[in-house]
Image (spheres, rainbow, N blue to C red):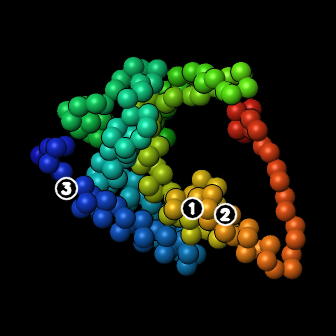
Amino acid sequence: MRHWDWDYLIWGKVRRLVFNLQKRIYKAAKACKYRKARSLMYLLQHSFYASLLGVRTVTTENKGKRTPGVDRVKANTPKRKKALVMDVLDTIQKGWDKYEAKPAKRIYIPKANGKQRPLGIPTIKDRAMQAVTKLAMEPFYEAKFEAASYGFRPGMGCKDAIDKITMVLLKKQKWILDADIKGFFDNYVG
């Protein structure tokens, strides 16, 4: 798209186009057609509409939309959002192997027990790149996840997990595992 204006985009159409491609990725992954799923994921990641939606997600919808990263850049005007879309799209077109994320800005959030929790804040561009990647990867992995897995999944919450636990407890099986992985992801080195 050569000429477009952030303020006049039809977001329902943008979401629908992205969602239709996500459905195709999900169906291909569910049918174990991995080559097709990968090519559809590539197509989605390189699409103008995925870049639009990724930028909208991190600049308009997310709670941290006004929080800058280490580069202190905010995309809080239509002009800056448009520039970010073009930057993200250009970076993706050049190839992921040439892309290097900037360091995250480290802040500390006080916890109830008086300690502090470290939080890394990526730059707005890095967040947009992550959002575009999520749009492509999420339908693939949703097709593969266990139906009874509820953590950090779209459309699934605590109530769903509690309902499932209740149903399981009503049956003969009575095993429950309570695990605490406190601080695991802050200290995990892969």
Q: Quick one: label 2, few (<14), some, or many (20+) residues within 10 Å?
A: some
In the rendered structure, which amino acid carries the disc numbered 2? Ala
On residue 10, the disc is: 3
Give the vertical position of 184 relative to 47 (above or below). Answer: above
Regarding residue 53, the answer to whether it shows in the image is yes
Circle on res. 46: none
Question: Residue 30 falls in which quadrant of the image?
Answer: bottom right
Residue at figure coordinates x 69%, y 70% from the top left: 164
Label 3 crowd bin: few (<14), some (14–19), many (20+), radius 10 Å: few
- Placement of 150 over or under 20, stated as above or below: above
Residue occupying the point 38% across, 60% down:
43
- Residue pointed to by mark 2: 161
Left or right: 61 in relation to 163: left
Q: Which residue is mark 1?
A: 156
Alpha carbon of mark 2 to alpha carbon of mark 1: how far?
8 Å
Residue placed most toward the observer, 147 or 158: 158
The amino acid type found where label 3 is placed reads: Ile
Separation (CA) of disc 1 from disc 3: 28 Å
**Residue 141 visible to an observer of this rendering:** no
- Secondary structure, mark 1, is loop
- Residue ID at (46%, 20%): 70
Label 2 secondary element: helix
- In the rendering, at what x and y percent does residue 51 appear? 33, 47
